Every structure is written in structure tokens, then in C-alpha cells.
Amino acid sequence: MGVTARPTRRAPRHLLVAAFVLAYLAAGGLVLVLGGRVAGGGWLAVHLVLLGAATNAIVVWSEYFAAALLRTPPASERVATGRALALNLGIVAVLGGVHGGRPGLAAAGACLAGGVVLGHAVVLALRIGRALPARLSGAVWFYVAGAAALLAGMGMGLWLAGGTAGSADGHRALRLAHVHLNVLGWVGLAVVGTQFTLWPTVLRTRMEPGLELAIRRALPPLAGGLAVAAGGLAAQQRLVALAGLAAYGAGLASPWSRSCARPGGGRRTRPRPGCSGPAWPGWWSRSWPTWAPWPPARGWPAWMATWRGWSRWWPPGSPCRR
């Protein structure tokens, strides 16, 4: 007689975080639909999606990926639920305080949300030190570095919200550094760290030999380049910022080539649309002209963001090349 497996109950934190993410996405879409009828709607929509939805998703899934890579149990339901509630209380306070012109409320919310993210990063770092040696444990450091970037970005955001940035040029410089730290740091580093292990699964291939070395080599130029770029932008030193972005791009070369250009020793895979995920640096480059403080990025060919365009990036023989 066969044994029927009992269906597993979805954890309450899954449902709670999913509800938060959907609520932020819906609110951001509503703000965009209303357009000019919402004062500061552009800022609010962006932060609803990135600070609200993306932060919730990264905090939850980075813990699960870390637990899987380090072979350690995830946080208990009570701890995870309390963390989610505190994080979102802080996020709502930041959004309401900045949008409503109440810097005190924004500062309190940033301290609460930042404390949750800091505690999350400390727990991940302690798990790395206590866990048994694992093949891909180095990928967890990407989440820790991303959390550090978010905390720095939050600090710059509070500085901007307080109106103490000085001149218009100084305000613009801090805003650019704030954007880089949050998008290329908090979101970008989490994506890259996850891509090392996730994308071979998406492409249904085995992991490339030497992946552990690639993980160790990728993080220093990514984190260091981001720090240099953010510092150069904040100090209005364009050459320094460009050097930092170049180092960040060099750091992307390792995970990008390992995860899509050569997974499984170049064996052809299906489906090819899965290869579009690692092409996110190209999609990001299409938005560069809207916020870049210098003109070299302007005029990038439009095909880089198209279906045929991203397929041209892969070297001959890649499973992702059309």
C-alpha cells in the first residue's frame, strides 16, 4: 500500500511577506496611474517598489538561500514574523515621513528598518562562521555586503530628506550615490550572489567547475567598486566614480560568464529564455542616460535591451546565444 504524502502547510511568514510585497507593488502601480495628482509621485512609486517590495523579498529569500547553502535551520516563525512586522513598520514610517515632510518620523522609521537589516546581516555572518565548510557558502557574503550598502544608502537618504545636502549640485551628487548604493548594492549584490547557484538550475545544467573560486573573486571588486563609485559620486569626482563603476563591471564578469555563458561546459540547454535573467546589467544600462552625471553612456544602441540584442552578448557556442 502506497503512502500518501501529507501536503505541507505554507508558513505564515510566507503569506505575510507575500501580502506585503503585493501591497507595495499595487500601491506603486496606483501612484503611477494617478500620475501628477500625487505630489512627489515619482519618488513614492520608486520607493514603494524598491524599498518596500524588493527589501521584503530580499530579506526573506536571502535567509532561505543562506540556510540552504550553509545547511543551517532558518529563523523560527515567531522571529521571522516579528522581523517582517518591524521591517514594514519602519518602511511605512520612512515613506510617510519623507513624503509628508516629517524628517523625525522618517529618521525613526529608518532606524527601525535599518536595525532589522543590520540584525539580519549579523545573523548571516555569524551563521557563516559557525556552519560547517560548504562549497558555496561564500555566496552568503553577497547578502551581507548588500545589507551594508543598504544601510549606507539609508543614511544618505536621511541626509537628503533633512535638506542638509547644501547646493543643488551637492544634493544631486548625494542622490546619485544613494541610488547606486541601493540599486547596485542592496538589489544588485543580492541578485549576483543568488545567480551563482540559481541560474544553473534554471538552465538545467550542472554547476561549472571552479565556481567556489569565482565566488571568492567576484565579491571584492563588486563591493569595493561600489564603495569607490558611491564615494566618487558623493564627492562629485567623476573620474573616481567611473573607476568604481568599471571595477563593479569587472566584478560582474565572473558571475555573468559562469552562470550563463558557460554553464554545464557549454552544453546547449532549454529553454533559452532562462538566459535573459543574467542580462540584467544590459537592461540597467538602458536606464543609465536618465541619471548618469556624465554623457559617455548616452547613445547606447537600443538593441541591447531587446530579445535579439541580449542574445548577441553571449560568446559563440554559448547555450544562450541565438
Image (cartoon, helix red, strand yellow):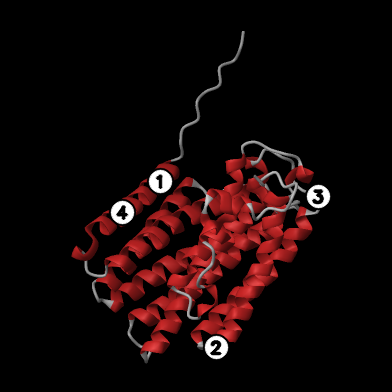
Considering depth in this image, is 67 or 239 the residue closer to the camera?
239
Which residue is the site of mark 3?
209
The local secondary structure at tag 4 comes to: helix
Position of residue 59 measured from the top left corner of the image (x, y, whole percent): 50, 56
The local secondary structure at tag 2 comes to: loop
Say above or below: 135 vs 51: above
Comes first in the chain, label 3 or label 2: 3
Few, some or many C-alpha atoms within 10 Å of disc 1 (few <14, some 14-19, many ≥20)? some
Position of residue 54 measured from the top left corner of the image (x, y, whole percent): 45, 57
Q: Marks 1/2: CA distance?
A: 41 Å
Considering depth in this image, is 228 or 13 the residue closer to the camera?
228
The amino acid at mark 4 is: Gly
The amino acid at mark 1 is: Ala
The C terminus - image quarter: top right
Label 4 with label 2: CB-CB less than 8 Å: no
Residue 131 in view (yes/no): no
Which residue is the site of mark 2?
237
Q: Marks 3/1: CA distance?
A: 35 Å
The amino acid at mark 2 is: Gln
